[in-house]
Image (spheres, rainbow, N blue to C red):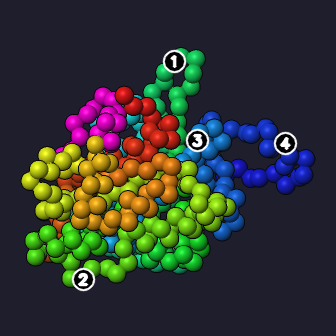
Amino acid sequence: MQTAPTHNVLKVLSRFWITATKGRKYTRQLAGRQCPNTDCKRVLPYNIERAKSYTIAIIGDGSAGKSHYIASCIHLLKQRQALQLIGCSRIVGWGKTEAIYQSKFYQPVFGNLQPIPLTPRARSEINEPLIYELIFKKEAWWKPAKSVNLFFYDASGEDLAEQDRMVQYSSYVLNASAIIFLADPLTMPNIVKALPSDLKPGAIRERSSSEVLNRITETFRMGQGLDAGASIDIPVAIALSKADLLKYVVRSQEATTQFLRETTSTNRLNTADFATINEEVQKLILRVGDKVLVQSSELFNTASFFAVSATGWAPDKGKYPAIEPLRCLDPLLWILWKLNVIEAE
C-alpha cells in the first residue's frame, strides 16, 4: 500500500503528479492506493487513476435472485464466446474478488447445484464490491490497450426496499453508473395463476416490483439533487428474473419469443435483439405483469426491458436439476454498449 502524503505541498503536488504503483518493486509489495474512506481502507486496483470505472448496481425485489444473477452473469462474462463478442482479450478480478466470487456465488450454484441463501440485512456500512477489469484488444501499436473497471455490488433486498437502510448501507446506488433492476415474476399475481401448482409460491409478496423501483428511483433523484420532474440520465435495464417460468405464460402466438431463446451471435453485438426483446417483454408485462414497471421506466432517459434466468430451472427439494442460464448477459452487454464501453453493429 502506498502511503498518502501528509505535507501540504506534497498533497497539492500529488493531485497532478501521480506516482504509478506498477513495476517489480510495487508488485512484490502488492502495492496499491487505499480507499479514502477510513472505515474501508481497502486497496484499490492499481489502474484506478488511468482506467475508467463503472459502478453496476444490481438491485430488485428481495426474492428476485440478485445473487444467482451475479453468479451466472460473471461466469458467462468470463467465457471465450462473451470475450470475443465484446472484443475483450481478458477479464481480471482484483484483490479478494475472485475468492469471494468463487465461495459466495459460483460454488453454491455451479458447483453444488444449490440455491444461494438470501443476502442478510447489512450490519456494516462497508459493502465490498466485486471488481473486474476488462482489458480490450489493442487496436494499434501506438495506442495502449483500453481497460475499464466494473464494480458489482450485491445487497439485501430488505436494505434496498427501505429508504433509510438503502441510504445507510447501500449508498453505492446513489453513485451508480448504471442499474440492473431484477423484477420477480412470482410477485405478479396473473403470472403466478398461469404456473403449474408445484411452481407457485406459498404466498405472493405484498410489495410490488414497481414500488421497489420507484422508491430507489426517488432516493437516487434526491442523492443527485434532481428536480421532481427531471429524468434520470443513467442506463437502467429492467429484467424479469426466473424467465424459465415465463414459458407457462406466453400465448401460442408468442411461443417464438426471442427472450425464451439464447443468443447465437458470437462476432458482434446485435442490438436488434435488444430492441426485439424490449418490445416483447413490455407487451408481456402490460398483459399479465406489473404494468406500473413500464410507466416507471419512463423516469429514465435510457431504459430497456429484458427477461433472464440465472439457473434455467426452479430448485427441486433444495437442488437444481441442472444450471442452464438464459440471456443473463443481455442487460450487462446493453449497459456496456450504452456507456460506450463496447461497440455494436
Q: Earlier in the sequence, mark 1 or mark 3?
A: 3
The mark found on residue 140 in the picture is: 1
Frontmost residue, 279 versus 105:
279
Residue segment shown in magenta: 261-275
Q: Residue 166, relative to residue 42: is it above or below?
A: below
Which amino acid lies under the numbered mark 2 shown in the image of this protein? Ala
Residue sitting nearer the eye, 241 or 73? 241
Q: Earlier in the sequence, mark 4 or mark 1?
A: 4
The residue drawn where x is 44% and y is 71% is: 212
Magenta-span inclusion, residue 91: no
* Residue matched to label 3: 52
Residue identified by numbered label 4: 13
Residue at image position (68%, 38%) is: 20
**Which SS class for mark 4?**
helix
Which secondary structure, mark 3? Answer: strand
* Label 2 element class: loop
